[in-house]
Amino acid sequence: MGKPTIPSASIQLPYPLYCCDFVDPHRLVVAGGGGPGRNGVGNKITLLDTSDATQLTELSELELSPNEDNVMSLVVVGPQKEKPAATTVLAGVNSSPDDVNKGQNKHMRALTITQPGKSAKTGGVKISEVARDALFVHRDKDTYQRILRLSPPHEGLTSSPRLGAAATGLSKHPQIALFNVPSTNSPRWKTRGRLEPRAEAMDLDVIQTGPDTYQLAYCDDHEVFTVEVSKAEVSEPRCVYTIEPDAGETVKASFKSLRYLTSGFLVTVVNNPKSRGVALHGLRLPKTEEENARLAIRAKLPSTVSKATSLAVRNLSPVASPSDKQGEAQFVIAVAGNDSSISLYTLEHKSAFDSDILSDLAPFQVLKSVHPSSITNLSISTFSPPTGSAKSSSELCVKLASVSVGCSTVVHNIPIKKHDDKSASSKTGGPSKPSRYVVALKSKAESPALIITLISLVFLILLLTGQVLIEAKDIGTPILGAKKYLPASWTVPLRKVPRMEVIKEKQKTIETLLSDVNAQSQPMIIKHDDLGGVGSDGLPVLQVDVMMRRLMDQAPRGKTWKRKIKIFGRNASSNRVIGWKRWAKTSSRAFYSEKSAVPLATSSARHFEDIIPQRQHKGYK
């Protein structure tokens, strides 16, 4: 069974596109153009209808001056409180080259999208410019407004302004300008200050942390910085994270994009050096000035993606107020690659006691060849959990928009479903957790094949090592036959004993040992050498002792006794079990002195047993 497809719709416009943002899930603003000059490609801002999952429709369009630059950055502020039918949009558009040369680059534009009513057709929607000004102070002719971001709105906090940030591109004097957007979403802004980083920001994002406090995060090629913004002041940038080269490497990876997940976590896109792939990094931000950010989670994009071009993130369970604690939530993450693909991931945010963690950063779809040319920007529509029976669960979705320099716009509809987590409450017996919304498509966790393979290899190596040790020490049955290939020092028995010199000229056997003993008057015992010596073959040395010990009991008169010797183990040369020796006749009465032993001779063998007295039977001689 193939992967479920995500429905999509597309439209081709007559100009290259560089930025996009959703007004709401049913309307999308796209912008771009050919720049100044008489190239025949205009600079435009277009409003598209995305309510139909199968097609996109153009609602309205604003054509800018052909003498000015194309639109390079754009953000939708939202509907104005005094005029709900009017939506404010901010855009970065450089003035004409003549004005720029004069030092009059009013690059910040405020526009309104006015729609008279819900029944208005294409002709009823109007886009118009209402204000323009400059945020950057340096008069660098090549500078343009490359990045524009705005802190997300909160339903439960409508009285505070939103913080915006704009960053330069191609500037000899990099700047980040901060400004306030009124809570009424009116097309006016108030400058809050400017930062002058050492290097140009690759990307930035803004989040509201309290009623009147915000945090800005930006990254250059190798470092992440944070800036605290309050009602009274703007702090100096503080480096909280630095990319270090991988083991054995001298070249560092570089940041491409970053977005806030919550006030405690960032997600970043990292391009590996020499175009060797892309990774997603989740960073845990520090809570004190003495700490630094830490890598909390990471994932690699498909190997076909050598560099990333854009990033978009959406929280499916947003908090109503910045002071509210973010509970369990799922984030949708989209990363555009230089192969015109879009990799889609889900990321879980979990909260338990006073600890927040990120987990399950997993892909759920890879959209291949979305555009015929490079993707320049991504945007995911806002998602507000439905109230009552406004929508059935089968109709829930978030929309992913992508634009390219090839003039194409594509909108994908990612299905969403309601999720009730009953596992935690059933285990603890407590109240069930509130329902939340997650992507309806199943995410694919990172394949465990590599981990299983590594564990299997380690286990196999341990088994082989153990078997070689067993064979080297003669502990068990040989299977590999490894002993003959091992050094002699490795094959010493586990019972470590001092090696004794053994006379090699005429080494005695068990038979010769017994031939030296008078079985009629000298009871015998065969045992290991008292000094624990071993022979030249590595086997323990046996010795035969004559035990001069008085027997306290007396055998019945007229009976004769026999003693036998049993040698356990195997013969070193033939590997055969050594059998019983002949009986040695003894007298019915024997008198010995106490505690006296006279060693007669020695021989090599494995085990021994004391001589055991038994009655004489017929047939024994």
Image (cartoon, rainbow, N blue to C red):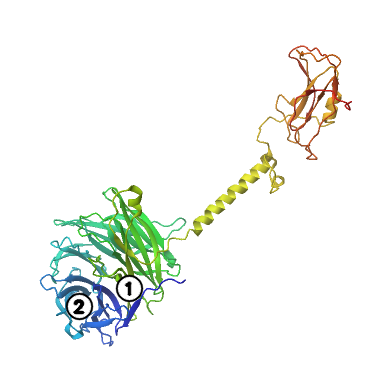
Under circle 1, the secondary element is strand
Q: Residues within 10 Å of mark 1 (few under 14, many from 20)?
A: many
Residue 36 found in image quarter = bottom left
Residue situated in front as seen by the camera: 63 or 5: 5
Outermost residue to the left: 82
Q: Position of residue 356 (x, y in %)?
A: 31, 52
List the residue tagged with mark 2. 95
In the rendered image, the vertical position of residue 410 relative to residue 165, given as above or below: below
**Closer to the N terminus: mark 1 or mark 2?**
2
Where residue 66 appears, x then y in whole percent? Answer: 22, 84
Whether residue 200 is visible, yes or no, is no
Q: Is residue 223 visible?
A: yes
Q: Is residue 224 above or below residue 21?
A: above
Q: Indicate the quadrant where residue 413 lies.
A: bottom left
Does 149 appear above or below 457? below
Q: How many marks?
A: 2
Q: Which mark is residue 413?
A: 1
Disc 1 marks which amino acid? Answer: Asn
Mark whose residue sits in front, 1 or 2: 1
Mark 2 residue element:
loop
Q: Which image quadrant is residue 212 in? A: bottom left
Q: What is the x, y in percent for residue 211?
A: 16, 57
